[in-house]
Image (cartoon, helix red, strand yellow):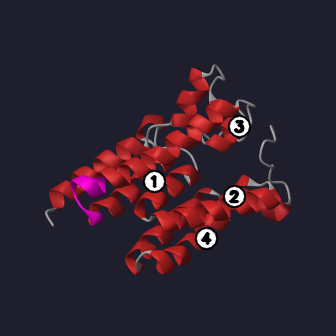
Amino acid sequence: MDILPLLVTAVLAYLLGSVPFGLLMARLFGLGDIRQIGSGNIGATNVLRTGNRPAAALTLIGDAGKGAGAVLAARALVGEDAAGIAALFAMLGHLYSVFLGFSGGKGVATFLGTVLALSFPVGLAACATWLLVALVFRISSLSALAAAGLAPAFTLYFYTWRGAVLIAILGALIFFKHKANIRRLRDGTEPRIGQKD
């Protein structure tokens, strides 16, 4: 395959992934700068800490949608290899947004969106894992880590080994961005879903 379409895919997916929906929704709903609230993260969980559920829901949809949209567009316009590249670069855009000085969120919603688009059964399994852990423990970060940790195994079962490698890389990014959460989980100080502080 010609390298140019893949390079263009990477750049466009990165720019789409860089759109900070949490920051935009917080401003749209008059919540201020979400980076100055709660954990300071730009994701849906932190937006939820403001108590504004519509803003949090729209952030979740936007962050998941940009990952899924990048993958689906790349697959339709270029091919399956481009879909994998789009998944990786949309994630990198969310984590290291060019619009936020190469900082960003922790990537959970974008991860789930990309996985759903890459393989719908794998995405459903990952989302179900997140939901089950969230219902039992009420801790968003633990749910994210469980989903990211199990997603490569789901991918091996439902999709391909190459897909499993890609999902493992995306999952590793989730774990890397959750280093502080992992420490708090060990210490028993990680906040629960809906907790404002």
> Callout 1: helix, strand or loop?
helix
Q: Residue at x 81, y 59 (%)?
A: 137
Amino acid type at mark 2: Leu
Q: Are marks 1 and 3 in contact (CB under 8 Å)?
A: no
Q: Residue 114, can we see it?
A: yes
Q: CA distance from mark 4 to mark 3?
A: 24 Å
Farthest residue, direction top? 30
Rendering coords of residue 55 (x, y %)? 63, 31
By secondary structure, the bulk of the magenta-drawn segment is best described as helix
The quarter of the image holding the N terminus is: bottom left
Other residues around mark 4 within 10 Å, as few (<14) / some (14–19) / many (≥20)? many
Q: CA distance from mark 1 to mark 3?
A: 21 Å
> For residue 3, what is the image quadrant?
bottom left
Asked if 195 appears above or below 33 in the picture, the reply is below
Q: Are marks 2 and 1 in contact (CB under 8 Å)?
A: no
Q: Residue at x 73, y 31 (%)?
A: 50
Q: Label 2, on which residue?
A: 131
Q: Which numbered tag is attached to residue 123? A: none
Counting residues from the start of the chain, the first of labels 2 and 4 encountered is 2
Give the mark toward the camera: 2 or 4. 2
Q: Which residues are magenta?
A: 74-80
Amino acid type at mark 1: Met
Q: Which numbered tag is attached to residue 149? A: 4
Give the mark toward the camera: 1 or 3. 3
